Amino acid sequence: MYLEYNAEQRKGKILELLHESGKVRVSDLSRMFHISEVTIRIDLADLESHGLLSRVHGGAVSSYKNYYNMNFNQRFSTNEAEKKAIAEYVANTVRDNDTVMMNAGTTTLFSLRALNVRRNISIVTNSIAIALEASGNANFNVVLLGGLVNTKYQFTYGDDALHQLSRYHADKLILSVDGIHAETGFSTYYNQEAEISRQMLRLSESALIAADYTKIGRTALTAIAPIDVAETLVTNKKANQDELDRIQAAGLHIITV
């Protein structure tokens, strides 16, 4: 007996195997998933096109340590100054008494810290790190969505989390993503969290995307939504200007800090 994976789950498992061993073989993956080597090669080609691995003879090796392989604490210290600059701008868009949804991510955690000057903010989040930190501030009313737990990246997900989330409505969404591309829209490396982000977009009056310059022009593993579902992107002046122009032409207002 073996587990059946859809294409997205299969590619996620391939990335997990790469993280563990640094290399995978087409023949081994074909036996593991009970599918043809041709299909495995198609999966690897797709992952390579997103910058997640490099194909070699007979398999693939890991090539994307900075995004997929880092744990939460490692990611927190990467591009820290750029994330803090984004967070300061984001915090200034939130008013006292607002209800704010925030997904998991290091930039959203920095944004939470910048919100300390606001009063009576209600926060709905699937981020364990955000909930723990916000719970120590009397100005924050915190709702942590229940459900399954991703311990490495410290977020909740799944049907229970989505059911609970559906009961809330927010004035503003602060959304962290792993990729922003004019054609493919917003995307994430963590397919477990993608539906949480989609539902937060539907349940918020306005959506602000908080993403450092390294995410611009990139397409991650799992699509979240097209560009025009959000109002504003806050990123860094270091971002590729040609990519920003294309994103803005697709309907997203851009602020660079």
Image: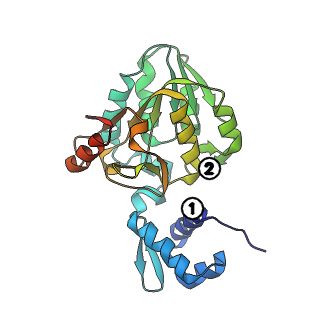
Residue 207 x, y percent position in the rendering: 44, 31
Say which quarter of the image contains residue 226: top left
Up-down: is 48 above or below 116? Answer: below
- The kind of residue tagged 2 is Asn
Q: How is the image coloured?
A: rainbow
Image quadrant where residue 212 sits: top left
Q: Position of residue 90 (x, y in %)?
A: 37, 28
Q: Disc 1 to disc 2, how far (Cα)?
A: 17 Å
Element at label 2: strand
> Three-letter amino acid code at disc 1?
Glu
Vertically, is 215 above or below 59?
A: above
Seen at 26% across and 47% down, the residue is 246
The image position of residue 98, as x and y in percent, is 49, 17
Q: Residue at x 55, y 38 (%)?
A: 129
Residue wearing tag 2: 150
Answer left or right for 252 relative to 133. Answer: left
Element under disc 1: helix
Mark seen at residue 8: 1
Label 1 environment density (alpha carbons within 10 Å; few <14, some 14–19, many ≥20): few
